[in-house]
Image: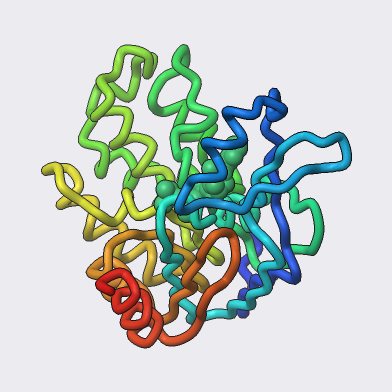
Amino acid sequence: MTIGTINAVEHSELSLKNVSVSFPIYHGGSRSLKKSLLFRSSGGQLASDASQRITVEALRNVSLGFRTGDRVALIGNNGAGKTTLLRVMAGIYEPVSGEVRSRGRISPMFDISLGIDGDISGYDNIRLRGLILGLSAKEIEERMEDITAFTELGDYLDIPVRTYSSGMMTRLTFAVATCFEPEILLMDEWIVAGDAGFLVKAQHRIENFVEKAGILVLASHSTEICKRWCNKAVWMERGEVKLTGDIDMVLDSYNAVAAA
Ligand SMILES: Nc1ncnc2c1ncn2[C@@H]1O[C@H](COP(=O)(O)OP(=O)(O)OP(=O)(O)O)[C@@H](O)[C@H]1O
C-alpha cells in the first residue's frame, strides 16, 4: 500500500503475461465433492496439485496488454474468471505463474469501504481513506469541501461512523473513492449500474471519474453497461481468454453464442 502524493504518469500501461491463478480446495479428496464439481458447466478447470489436492484453475495462461485510452469490458459466464482477473491485476491475488506489470497507479474500486474505522468520525475517515488512496494530507484538505458536500452528511461527519446507516456509509466511501484522478481503474459493474436515488447523483460523479482514468477495466454481465463505458472487451471462458478486441465485435460474438 502506498502512502504519499500521487505522482501521475502520462501514459498508463497494464500487461499480463501467461498469468495463471489456482485455488486449492481443502478436503478435496472427497469423491462426492469432486464428482459434483466435475459436473459444473462453467467456472475454472479442476486440476490436482503436487499433494493431490483438488484445485480450481481460475485463470490459465492469460496474456493481455492495455494502454492509456483503453476502456475494457471483462465479459463471460459465471465463474469464467472475471473477478479473479480484476483481483490479480489489483495485486490482491498472486499468480502461481506468469507476471503482471503496470505503469501508473492501480485503483481498485471494489471493497471501497475497506479500512473504514467505526470509532472515528466521518471527517477522520475521509482523511484516513485519502491517505490509503495515496493522497497527501494537503491534497485531502483541498478535496475536503467537495467530498463533504457530496455526502450531504452535514453534522454527522463529526460523529463516529458506526452510528451511520448503510446508505450514509455508502455516500461517505463513494465520495472519497471518487475524489481523485485515477490512472488504472479496476471496477465491478455495481458501481456504474445505478438504481437508488443516491446513485442517480452518483452517476454524474462516476462519469467524470471514469472519464479521467487512463485505463478502465470493468467486469460486467450487461451488454448495455459494456457498450456505454467501454471501447474494448475481453471475453473470458473457463479461466482463459476466448476473444479480445473491439467492444462491438466481441459482444456480438459472445451474444451470438449465448443465444445459440
Ligand atoms: N476464493 C476462491 N476459492 C476457490 N475457488 C474460487 C475462489 N474464487 C474464485 N474461485 C473459482 O474460480 C473460478 C473463477 O471465479 P471468478 O469469481 O473469477 O468468476 P467470475 O467470472 O467473476 O464469475 P461471476 O460472473 O459469477 O462473478 C470459479 O470456478 C470459482 O469457483
Tell me, yes or no, if residue 92 can be seen here: no
The residue lying at 42 percent from left, 69 percent from top is 73
Residue 23 lies, with reference to residue 87, above or below; the image says: above
Residue 41 lies, with reference to residue 13, above or below; the image says: above
The residue sitting at the left extreme is 197
Residue 84 percent coordinates (x, y): 57, 51
The residue lying at 62 percent from left, 53 percent from top is 45
The residue closer to the viewer here, 242 or 165, is: 242
Task: Using residue 221 as the reference point, say whether residue 141 is left or right of it.
Answer: right
The residue closer to the viewer here, 213 or 27, is: 27
The residue lying at 52 percent from left, 36 percent from top is 36
Query: In the picture, which quadrant includes the N terminus?
Result: top right
The residue closer to the viewer here, 145 or 88, is: 88
Task: Using residue 203 as the reference point, say whether residue 175 is left or right of it.
Answer: right
Residue 192 percent coordinates (x, y): 29, 56
Residue 213 percent coordinates (x, y): 46, 69
Q: Quadrant of residue 54?
A: top right
Residue 166 lies, with reference to residue 55, above or below; the image says: above
**Number of numbered discs on residues:** 0
